[in-house]
Amino acid sequence: MQTEPDLSAQHHVIIIGCGFGGLEAARSLNHPRVRITLIDRSNHHLFQPLLYQVATAGLSAPSIAAPIRHMLRRQRNVTVLMAEVGGIDKAARQVKLSEGQVLSYDALIVATGATHSYFGRDEWAQHAPGLKTLADAFKLRARILLAFEQAEKTGAPEARAPWLNFIIIGGGPTGVEMAGTLAEIARHTLRDEFRRIDPASAQILLLEGSDRVLQAFPPELSAKAGRQLEALGVQLHCGSRVVQIDAEGVEIEEQLPAPEGGAPQTRRRRIPARTVVWAAGVAASPLGRSLGLPLDRAGRVIVEPELSVADHAELYVIGDLAAAQSHEKDGRALPVPGVSPAAKQMGRLAAANILARLQGKTAQKFRYVDYGALATIGRKAAVADLGRFRFSGYFAWLFWLFVHVYFLIGFRNRLVVLMDWAWAYLSFQRYARVIAEPAGGAEADS
Amino acid sequence: MQTEPDLSAQHHVIIIGCGFGGLEAARSLNHPRVRITLIDRSNHHLFQPLLYQVATAGLSAPSIAAPIRHMLRRQRNVTVLMAEVGGIDKAARQVKLSEGQVLSYDALIVATGATHSYFGRDEWAQHAPGLKTLADAFKLRARILLAFEQAEKTGAPEARAPWLNFIIIGGGPTGVEMAGTLAEIARHTLRDEFRRIDPASAQILLLEGSDRVLQAFPPELSAKAGRQLEALGVQLHCGSRVVQIDAEGVEIEEQLPAPEGGAPQTRRRRIPARTVVWAAGVAASPLGRSLGLPLDRAGRVIVEPELSVADHAELYVIGDLAAAQSHEKDGRALPVPGVSPAAKQMGRLAAANILARLQGKTAQKFRYVDYGALATIGRKAAVADLGRFRFSGYFAWLFWLFVHVYFLIGFRNRLVVLMDWAWAYLSFQRYARVIAEPAGGAEADS
């Protein structure tokens, strides 16, 4: 048992959510006048940019997830609780845990991020899982590996095709990464391992509603990404709107070229597939709605320039849950992208503003510093947009690798992840191809 | 698609189960006159001797599990099917898969091993999970880590104790390994990470029904193992029979010293504990019973000296499922221990006898070559019985480490496992402390 300091004298900050924003806020509040309670539903901080590698069996879960209380063990003013938050009472300044405990706060940071959105079609979730948590990644890994197993086992050749069709819905960074990696698995990783099927005959389809992948990038990099995907064997379908998903496949509405003098036409088409990945929509975490504050169309909480909310200078919302703006020096207010550097920068500012108020100083407005954007496509392929420098291909991939390994939390993970990648690169192998549940059991993990 | 050889000319061997025995049999049947169908419920071969390391967060699952079809990709006469077997028809020489397919064989090797036995008290399973599969290991890992989380979260100090009591039932190798490792986690790994509880105050109880741990070892090594366990902080209770397990704890009947001139007495006692690990009983896989053959008391199939079964020279049962005897040169028939070297040796002999029959030669009797026994206890502690050489302590632990890393399948795994252990040894850390399911969710994995 630790001897506890005089708690009444300290400013009690509760942080909900230990993603990039919440973790950065906790670290920035390492101050003797503050004590922190950090609440997360998981026991680990997740390096989400590499989650697709767990889903595609390239990395094991512990390589990208570290126990929160281990990361913060030396910061003595933090108490970590693994719990779910049931509600927030802004007026009473209280957080209620689902299990019933009530915690009072002097300042609160809500950083619970985003979840999948199926645009009101929640029944699609069972057929087309998304990728936000480790549990999601294990579910996808099992589905992908089991599809090849099922194709090998199926007696009738005509029944095999749907097992060898893989559809990824959404051409953002996650969809592009998943499609490129799936193509690599089918063409290289599984070579020589099957006797009745040829894994390389698998079809990897990437469906994107708009006219190009990676919308957040300049059009010329989107075009390069599209060409790199096709070189890897991915079939790219832009202008494809999904209208139905069920256990047997996906129904899409495709835009056709307009006939001469006529209006653009669409065509409905069904693609049979047993494995569908949802990488299309995200929505703000439901906790945002429960705050009773104005939301934007995506369900994000509208925040003041200082990242606190209206009438509650002690309540901050940061990261993907916040509809924040970047307040430029020239007075413009720009939108902030939903990326981890933005969440970290918000976490740092919310912490600084809490300390400023405590010391009678003025809170600062949020300004996002953009270091550029990176997306990987697959083996040796990536695109980078660093503002003045835009590049793609092998060098962009090496740059992507360096940046991601550098930002991975903890020395051990960095080294092991680099080794795993070096091994995968040289051998074309993916070592984490484990389905923990037996055949006929529930869906799997590892 | 591979071009298939003339299958009718080949001897079709079906192997059910890809543990140590089944895998060795498949490898030994790499012969042009044989084609093999290898059926397993999992997609991976599991290095079971290190499964307790996955359960105690020291290793990630992919470090000890490799995809079966990857291991056998170069052996072109093997087709791997991930499927569950629903039944075996000895007379028709057919194996039926649970999904309905029927496969005919010329020879069959059944190698489905053992599972937990709760001695008829199957309702204990939910409270005291055992450790045979990766899914078991993830369940245990989550329970152990969540117990400390729950203790930290619990408001009332008196409610904490049951969360900090860990009971391991059964003093065989698995129970001893689990108890020693849990003590290390409580005393070292979690140091500095909690604010309300002291993890080192956790009680680790090892309950053994007989008068000593590690019954398969000579008594002096059992005594040394007991002292090493106690030095690590484990409370060892020999002569404790479990009479009840529920969600709140375990009820035991303890043997008390006999009073002068009287009979030995027993006492019933309840130990509150939220985390109970079952390492007491194993029973042969249920597939053995379905064969309609004579079984021994443990449910193992009684086999002929050649490892085939009575009246069916084409049907072999090997590994933990077989009640086999070792036929010594001097004519004695000795029992065979349920360890991986025995399973491997049986797999090799069954394969050799199938090839012998095919070539009109005489089948050989099974003789077990005993290389000794090893059990690890925890950090720097182990016992080794190599027949003429018996030793314990640090040197035995180094020897144990060397043997286990050597036998781990695949170069990559060996290297990574050694690195993980070197890191764990120097830092006292266990890197795989990930619970994949969030608080309030179902039980976890990773």
Image (cartoon, coloured by chain):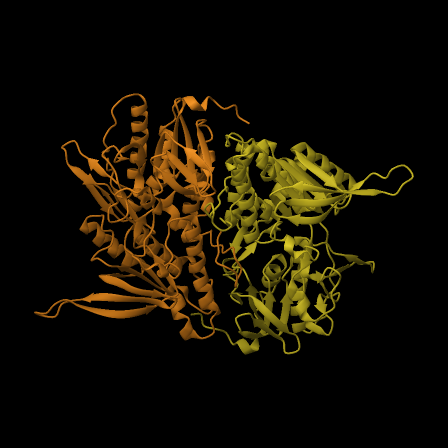
Chain colours: A yellow, B orange
Q: Is residue B116 left or right of residue A229?
A: left
* Depicted A356 relative to depicted A346: above or below: below
* Residue A400 visible in this rendered orientation of the protein: no
Query: Which quarter of the image is occupied by the N terminus of chain A?
Result: bottom left
Number of labels in the image equals 0
Query: Toward the viewer: A241 or B232?
Result: A241
Give coordinates of residue B33: x percent, y percent.
39, 22
Give coordinates of residue A156: x percent, y percent.
55, 34
Query: Toward the viewer: A339 or B282?
Result: B282
Query: Toward the viewer: A97 or B9?
Result: B9
Give coordinates of residue A409: x percent, y percent.
56, 51
Query: Toward the viewer: B307 or A51?
Result: B307
Give coordinates of residue A197: x percent, y percent.
54, 31
Instruction: Tell me the quarter of the picture where residue A389 sits.
Output: top right
Residue, far right: A261
* Residue A443 visible in this rendered orientation of the protein: yes
The residue that appears at 44% across and 46% down in the rendered structure is: B420
Residue, far front: B92
Instruction: Tell me the quarter of the picture where residue B86 sits.
Output: top left
Instruction: Tell me the quarter of the picture where residue B15 sits.
Output: top left
